[in-house]
Image (cartoon, grey):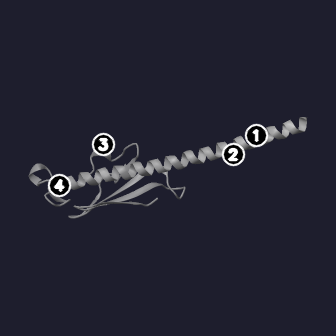
Amino acid sequence: MGQQQLLLIVLGVIVVGIAVVVGINLFNANAQSSNRDAVISDLNNLGAMAQQFYKKPTSMGGGGNTFTGGGGWSIPVQLRTTANGTYNNPAPVLSDSTVTIVGIGTETGNDGSAPVKATCTVTPTQINVHVDN
């Protein structure tokens, strides 16, 4: 009877160990996915802000149908670094008709070495987000 009890204890320890490893992996995957979604959401919000600037007349502090007009659009200081990541600190890449914003997340990305990264391209009518990692 002693060997059977010992075998059950060893088997129980192995099962619990496997369950802990699987749980940790699921937690890390969820954190990565959540951070990626949050960075994409922040980029969409920043893209909408850029479009508002584009459409607003220069007399009202906007760009007057250009992203470079009226001093050019820039990411507000308080939104350059958030709990989700960092966004083109200090400035996005601007042209008259496009803005490119890069977001770097706080969690490790798919490759396991670099952080989550997404690029947002904003035009007067579209916001496109491409996940890089």
Amino acid, disc 4: Gly
Q: Nearer the viewer, mark 3 or mark 1?
A: 1
Provide the residue designation for mark 1. 12
Q: Nearer the viewer, mark 3 or mark 2?
A: 2
Q: Is residue 125 above or below residue 40?
A: below
Provide the residue designation for mark 3. 78
Q: Residue at x 23, y 61 (%)?
A: 125
Q: Earlier in the sequence, mark 3 or mark 2?
A: 2
Q: Earlier in the sequence, mark 1 or mark 4?
A: 1
Provide the residue designation for mark 2. 18
Amino acid, disc 2: Ile
User: Where's residue 27, x and y in %?
Assistant: 55, 45
Provide the residue designation for mark 4. 71
Amino acid, disc 1: Gly
Residue 58 as seen in the image, left or right of residue 82: left
Q: Earlier in the sequence, mark 2 or mark 4?
A: 2
